[in-house]
Amino acid sequence: MAALVMGATVLTACGGVTVEGNTGSADTTTSVARESATEGTTVTKETSRSSSSDGGHSEPAPQDKPAAEVSELPDASAERSPQDLDFLDDLKEAGIDVEGVEDQLIATASTVCRAKEAGEENFTLDAIAGQLIAQGRTDIPEDRAIEVSELIQETAERTYC
């Protein structure tokens, strides 16, 4: 019987926590119900806090708007250093189409220098060379991919390292 009374009390206490009425009011109140059960009795404590602490002069909430069609993409090109431009120009002169993969090639050059400083082999070069060939960015056939790797490595070392 005590459990039934406690359950009814808990359900009654929870009823006041739901949102009812005008949700667009600038002077809303937040209620938090805290319950603690001690020896078969339930004590409920409500704490209220008004959200209009500035006297009711708050800015209106932002409104959702439908998506707008983009007429043109913003210019996403990054600022390139003179070294970056030299590196990319040298690759272009060697017959590699760098359009759209400039950042990846510059990052690859960075790995070349890091590997050289650490005295380690750079496995990224072969992967990038293979991708350039597979994407048709060079006329060098796949069986001569090592030439593309060496070209990128030599150009990176000459330009950056």
Image (cartoon, rainbow, N blue to C red):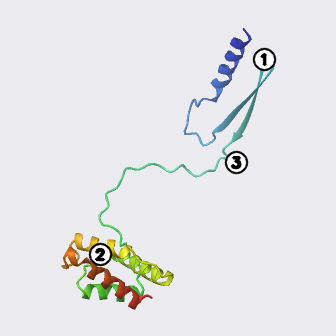
Q: Position of residue 129 (x, y in %)?
A: 29, 75
Q: How many marks?
A: 3
* Residue bearing the label numbered 3: 53
Disc 3 crowd rating (10 Å Cα; few below 14, some 14-19, many 20+) is few
Q: Give the residue type at disc 1.
A: Gly
Which comes before the other along the chain, label 2 or label 3?
A: 3
Residue type, label 2: Ala
Amino acid on which disc 3 is placed: Ser
Give residue 21's position: percent from left, percent from top: 57, 30
Which residue sits at x=44%, y=48%? 64
C-alpha span from label 3 to label 1: 39 Å
Crowding at dot 1, Cα within 10 Å, few <14 / some 14-19 / many 20+, comes out as few
Quick one: quadrant of the C terminus? bottom left
Query: Which is more toward the observer, 79 or 160?
Result: 160
Mark 3 residue element? loop
Q: Residues within 10 Å of mark 2 (few under 14, many from 20)?
A: many
Residue at 23% across, 75% down: 137
**Nearer mark to the viewer, of 3 and 1:** 1
Check the image and report above or below for 29 versus 90. above
Alpha carbon separation for disc pair 2 and 3 = 62 Å
Which mark sits nearer the N-terminus, 1 or 2? 1
> Element at badge 2?
helix
Residue pointed to by mark 1? 40
Give the farthest residue toward the top: 1
Along the polypeptide, which appears first: circle 3 or circle 1? 1
The residue that disc 2 covers is 129
| In this rendering, position of residue 114 left or right of residue 8 | left
Mark 1 or 2: the one toward you: 2
Nearer to us in this view, 81 or 25: 81
Against 93, residue 142 (above or below) is above
